[in-house]
Image (cartoon, rainbow, N blue to C red):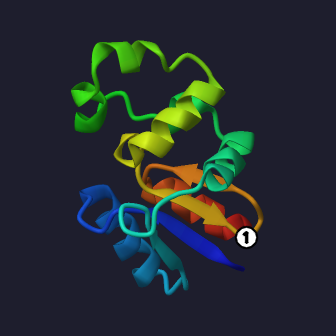
Amino acid sequence: MAVTLYGIPNCDTVKQARSWLAAAQIEVAFHDFKKAGLTSAIIAEWLQTVDWQLLVNKRGTTWRKLPPTEQLAVLDTASALQCMLKSPSVIKRPVLVLGSGEILVGYSAEKYQAAFAAN
């Protein structure tokens, strides 16, 4: 099964997810979206499965540093997509995409265990 982990390498949560995947001996492709970027097609694919409100990390530093006008402009899927393209660090990390099409946002050992037990 093809598994891709999206995130940035210096993020603590991404480090935890990568450690869990390595310990479970799960082969995963890592996509550093700060270096490799993200396309609207990738984010749009996530948004078909995951609610934009889960993907946009409103508790993170990047969100808090956005001007209030930009924050208030994020009202729906389309505006969230534009915000994530402009400021990828606003995306809650990591985003784990399984070959089955399942997408997990954030890291939880329990959720990862359940996802890989089911696949």
Q: Position of residue 85 (x, y in %)?
A: 49, 44
Q: Position of residue 24 (x, y in %)?
A: 48, 81
Kind of residue at disc 1: Gly
Q: Is residue 90 above or below residue 20?
A: above
Q: Is residue 68 above or below residue 3?
A: above
- Which residue is located at x 30 percent, y 14 percent? 68
Numbered marks: total: 1
Q: Is residue 21 above or below residue 58?
A: below
26 horizontally vs 109: left or right:
right
Q: Looking at this view, is 43 or 94 the one in front?
A: 43
Q: Looking at this view, is 103 or 48 the one in front?
A: 48
Quadrant of the image occupied by residue 20: bottom left
Q: Position of residue 57 (x, y in %)?
A: 39, 35
Characterize the local packing of mark 1: few (<14), some (14-19) or many (20 or more) Cα atoms within 10 angstroms. Answer: few
Which residue has dot 1 on it? 99
Q: Is residue 36 above or below residue 73?
A: below
- Which residue is located at x 31 percent, y 56 percent? 13
**Quadrant housing the C terminus:** bottom right
- Which residue is located at x 42 percent, y 12 percent? 72
Dot 1: element: loop
Q: Position of residue 86 (x, y in %)?
A: 43, 41
